[in-house]
Amino acid sequence: MIEKESSRGTEKKGENMISVENLSHYYTQNQVFAVKNVSFQVEKGEIFGFLGPSGAGKSTTQGVLTGLLPLQQGRVRVAGHDLSHPKRTMFNKIGVSFEQSNVYGKLTARENLDFYAKLFDVPTMKTMDLLEMVGLDKVADKKAGTFSKGMKHRLTFVRSMINKPEMWFLDEPTTGLDPAIGSQIKDIIRQENEKGATVFLTTHNMQVADELCDRVAFIIDGEIKLIDSPRNLKLQFGQQMVVVDHLVQGQRKTEQFSLIMDEDKTRLNQLIQTGQIQMMHTKEATLEEIFIKVTGRGLE
Amino acid sequence: MKRIAAIVGRDIRSGIRDWLIVYLSIAPFIIALILRSLIPGVGDSLLSVVVLDQNPLVSSLEQVARVELVSDLESLEQRVLRMDDVFGIVYTRGAYELVVQGNESEHSLGMLETLMARLTNPSSSVPVDIQFSDLGWEMSPLKLYGGIMLMLFTTVFGGMFIVLNLVDEKMHKTLRALNVSPLSRVELVIGKGMLGFLLPLVGCLGAAWIMGFSGIHLGMFFVTLLSIATISIIIGFSIGVMNDEPISAVASMKMVMLPVLLSVFGAMYLADNWHWVLFWSPFYWAYLSMNGILLQQADWFLVLRNSGFILGLTVLVFMGLRKKIVNGLE
């Protein structure tokens, strides 16, 4: 993760793929805001996680960024396009994968992708290559209506890659997938990111965000509470402690050692050299714990 | 253009896998065939007879009736038994006898009896002067009104194509995927409306041909069909975007049949000075145009005036539903 961050650092050059200034959005005429005065930037080549519980404003923000919702207040630029005057051509650079799979049930997997490819003005990826990526090549000629939920989700996911997007919006890309397929999807996201795709990842799965994201934003009640890298957040909010399980006269004993206090550091060194250590781990905070600490709310 | 073709191609592919759409496509032809079988010989003579081919009265009969020839008595009886009114004439035991099915019109039977009496007995004192009168009917009412209804419903069914395709998109939430592609709203509307536009045109042309409306003015026919198709498309889009599943969409579409039926039957049965109550309905104006075209009495002024009314009313309907349609496509 650290290696990835440092190598990415040379690629970014400060160019923003997404720039959001004072974005607000409401659904009803009484102006109860679903998103309130949100501002953030996503740099080119970054994987940016947008994290929050249901109803926090994640989908509304993504809806505005992908042009599915009109821009009401604020300024938004995506992939060099000003969304106050959106042009359809901007979608040649953008890919969007939806949380709820949305494919044509009466068309086969191959037909679904072939049809979608024809809507773009840019060179598109080969249908079979895409299907192979997510293990759907064997069922390429089966109607998508006969697919399981996970298969439809994978088809929706690869469809969003068909135009080799520079800006890739992913909404809960691993939700509902078994761990092996989920891991495959994460690998694909990493690979595409390494090729240069900027990723805007909307999720409530903190583990996925932790594994993939360079930076994360916590959104709750339509407001961004915090933006930083998972590493910085862990350093900031985690405890600098080590927990050690070791044996003392045949009995298991658990002790905590501060990584700041000299006395604890000396004792820990002695234990490593002379003791019978069974397990040892840092008391690192998870993103979920940090989220709860920052927002005072859980993710469900 | 490439994207419109892609949308049309997808809709065709999806449509042929959906039997309901296939049925809707062939329905105009089947209905036209049924109507055609119910009105054989319309436009020809009103009196039809079948005789054995050596009958000496054939040439005399041909002057006043449509005459069919058969080789034997069994064929003659079979022909008489068919659905339409055809009388058999046979010569037995020194006299001519009429072979009837029993459900023929009394007037036709009486007329034929008088005619046969005159033909077989030239010295008869009964003066026979046969005249056919259509009492104001230029063609069979079944053919005319059946044809008009079929044309109107076929174009309305065009809206049904759009409804079913849009409902399919809404059910599977695929419109969202289209909305994050370079496909413009105009391309989407044209692509989605194309089949609902073209298939009724083909259906109406085919139905007109099957029903024997061969002499109609095709230009006027096209202009009228195009104008009716616009209202069907608006209706198709408005119902399609407001429904998420096909049953409710079809139920809504059925409601559209009501103004069609009201307009046609109103125009048929209301006195002329009451026709103003139908002026709100584009289908009334469509009926007037279609009636004139099928009777070959329409002129361009009538067709363009009525099409203008249809398009004007369509614009009003569209203005009223515009917001719902646009929101529904998002």
Image (cartoon, rainbow, N blue to C red):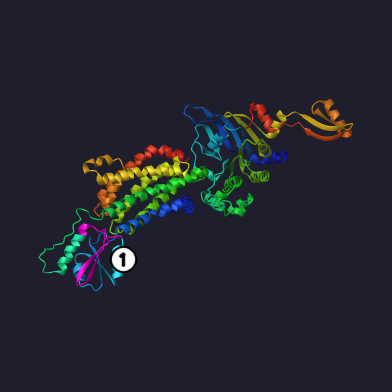
- Compared to residue B69, the image places residue B213 above or below, namely above
Quadrant location of the N terminus of chain A in the rendered image: top right
Residue tagged 1: B78
Asked whether, in this view, residue B59 is left or right of residue B242, the answer is left
Quadrant location of the C terminus of chain A in the rendered image: top right
Instruction: Report the magenta residues as a range.
Output: B83-108
Q: Is residue B310 visible in this depiction of the protein? A: no
Image point 64% across, 51% down: which residue?
A135
Task: Out of B160 and B226, give the one closest to the viewer.
Answer: B160
Task: Out of A86 and A220, give the one closest to the viewer.
Answer: A220
Q: Quadrant of residue A166?
A: top right
Task: Out of B246 and B60, give the one closest to the viewer.
Answer: B60
Image point 28% across, 53% down: which residue?
B142
Image point 78% across, 34% down: which residue?
A281
Image point 57% across, 32% down: which residue?
A57
Q: Is residue A156 visible in this depiction of the protein? A: yes
Asked whether, in this view, residue B322 is left or right of residue B276, the answer is right
Image location (x, y in percent) of residue B84:
28, 60
Which amino acid type corresponds to the residue marked 1 in the rendered image?
Gln
Q: What kind of element bears circle 1?
A: helix
